[in-house]
Amino acid sequence: MGYGREREADMDDAQAWDERLSWAYGLISKDPAERAVALDHLASAREATAEAVAHFNSTLMALQEQGVEDPYDVPALRVAWEERLRIGSRSLPDGVWHRLDYEDIVEWPGLPYALLFLEWEARFPDEWTLAAKEWGTKEGLIRDLAVDSVGRNAVARAKLIDLVEIVVRRAYRCKDREYVRIARVVDGPPLRVRLEAARRSENPWARLHAGYVLWLLDRPEVPNSRRVWRTWLADAQQ
């Protein structure tokens, strides 16, 4: 569906992103009261997004039932789609779904909010799960961020090193395994010092996860597959 490209481009500069989603920084606040306000805002945004999606779907269905050959050329559907984009862009996870045509994600104005979405899941997993669980978005963002240019960006690199440490120190959650991609991109002394500390800690999850990630970092040619994990785990527990 290409007719929303111009509208999307108008919405894709740093100021526009901040106007839409700056409230979301409250989701990662250490202050429970600030998080509560942000969670209330998110609930309203998600409700509005669901209504916009339902309106678009009902408009499309009505046109199809009328036998319209190309409903996507109908102005009413164009308007419904643009509203769905506009309203969804003010919510999460919908707001971080559209990256347009940026070849380098570091140039994408939405990068801070992609990092925010992942940080929210890492630091407050229960709230994330209740309010905006979307494993596919988590996986997709991690894979998008696991590129060399992100590893060379000081701000993004520091944030991602924090996230890798948080993830290896907790019980496994869905798609956490994808963070090995990030670890390989931000590999270096700052990350390894933290991983070594986790590997030597009293936390059994941290010892296992950090040990596995360090083992993989020393073997960049080895895939991070379930089979490799099981084999490594069996050897580590002997």
Image (spheres, grey):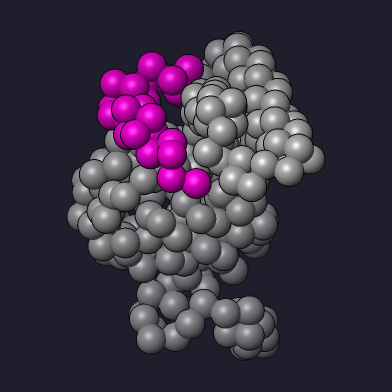
Left or right of 70: which side holds 164?
A: left
Rendering coords of residue 50 (x, y %): 70, 28
Helix, strand or loop: magenta stretch: helix
Asked whether residue 24 is in view, the answer is no
**173 and 168: which one is in front?**
173
Q: How many numbered discs, if any?
A: 0
Q: Residue furthest right?
A: 65
Rendering coords of residue 189 (x, y %): 26, 61
Position above or below: 19 against 211? above
Left or right of 230: which side holds 109?
A: left
Q: Quadrant of residue 191?
A: bottom left
Q: Looking at the image, which residue is at 43% across and 66% down? A: 181
Q: Looking at the image, which residue is at 65% across and 20% down? A: 48
Asked whether residue 18 is in view, the answer is yes
Q: Looking at the image, which residue is at 36% across and 68% down? A: 184
Residue 208 magenta: no
Rendering coords of residue 149 (x, y %): 23, 57
Position above or below: 94 against 199? above
**172 and 208: which one is in front?**
172
**69 and 135: which one is in front?**
69
Left or right of 193: which side holds 155?
A: left
| Quadrant that contains the C terminus | bottom right
Residue 15 magenta: yes
Residue range highlighted in magenta:
1-25
Q: Looking at the image, which residue is at 70% across and 36% down? A: 63
Rendering coords of residue 175 (x, y %): 61, 59
Position above or below: 198 against 75? below
